[in-house]
Amino acid sequence: MPSAELRLPGVPGARLVWPPAKPTATLVVLAEEQGEPLCRELARRCGVLALCVPCRGPQDGTAALEWTADHAVQLGAAGPLKLTGVGAGAGYAEAVAARAREQGWPAVELVQPRADLPPA
Amino acid sequence: MLYLHGGGFTLGSAYGYRPLVGALVAAAGVGALVPDYRLAPEHPFPAALEDAIGAYRWLAEQRAGAPIVLAGDSMGGGLACSLLLALRAQGLPLPAGAVLLCPAVDLLDDAGDGEQRAIARRNAEAYLAGHPPDDPLVSPLHGDFSDMPPLLIQSATGDFVLPQARRLADHAPDARLELYPADTHVFHVFWTFLPEAADALGQAGEFIRSRLAGEAAVARDA
């Protein structure tokens, strides 16, 4: 599955993983550090365009989410924008989603992280 | 390094590429040879590839076996890939790596829209002059990249040939794809004022440095 290092200014180490077919949604995953294996699984099993963001706080998450909302179409994405987090990233994801709701943009669905993935 | 300029096989010159290649040379800390390969429609395939092979062989001779890295932008990136395939087919020594800036590697792909697509089509027709577009020597995406040296592919999120770069990264076993948040094809040319372009050239320079250092160490140990 193709993946790329996304060189977003101010958000070092972000990685993008494309699903095998046309993406059904775009999922931003806030992880403490190496979340790429998880993103590869999510792209493969759920068919989402997964953006893995090594998040040091809500600011990184907000920057990545807002950039993605503006540019997902350029990356071949269709469907809704979703957000989740693992580890400390789960808390950041809640804060980032709350902030997006407050400002009224971007429209994002917060997905609760789960230990089990849907069956392959 | 051997730098193959872009321009759809119909435009571009060594002279015009001095600012961009100069910046890449500064970032990599090595010199560059930029051949004025023959252009279509006056000189269709295989003129550009023959000139690229000639330039590579000349440079290899001058460098007496010291490692060489290929670089190229847009169709020049595609030409660098064609050169890799041609060198391997001819049993010639391969370069230590290749840096591909927003490469166009598939003439079968009808990329872009409106005027952009019309220009790309016209260029492809001029270069092919009846040659089959699925020949890996003109559309290297359809070639075999197993056992090829490492590739660094840089593309922009708004580049109309990003899908080709992505497919090449997926197709070549030893390829790394870097994606920059920029809205144009070959955004690197804006390195003087676009931070993303300066970042990209810095990364490309580091890749070239490490490839040349790695190959020199292998040669020393042998």
Image (cartoon, rainbow, N blue to C red):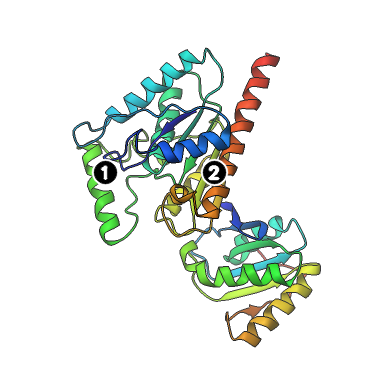
The residue depicted at 45 percent of the width and 53 percent of the height is B162
Task: Name the chain letter of the residue that bears numbered label 2.
Answer: B
Q: Name the residue under label 2.
A: B201
Q: Is residue A70 left or right of residue B11?
A: right
Q: How far apart are marks 1 and 2 (CA)?
A: 28 Å
Q: Name the residue under label 1.
A: B124
Labels 1, 2: front one: 2
Q: Is residue B145 left or right of residue B54?
A: right
The residue depicted at 27 percent of the width and 28 percent of the height is B47
Query: Residue type at mark 1?
Result: Ala
On screen, residue A92 above or below B44: below
Depth check: B91 or B200 in front? B200
Depth check: B88 or B208 in front? B208
Quadrant of residue B53 in the image? top left
The residue depicted at 35 percent of the width and 38 percent of the height is B16
Secondary structure at numbered mark 2 = helix
Label 2 CA crowd tier, 10 Å (few <14, some 14–19, many 20+): many
On screen, residue B80 above or below B222: below
- Residue at the front extreme? B192
Q: Which mark is residue A55?
A: none
Query: Residue type at mark 2?
Result: Leu
Q: Is residue B179 left or right of residue A63?
A: left
**Residue A8 % position (x, y):** 60, 59
Residues indicated by labels 1 and 2 sit on the same polypeptide chain: yes
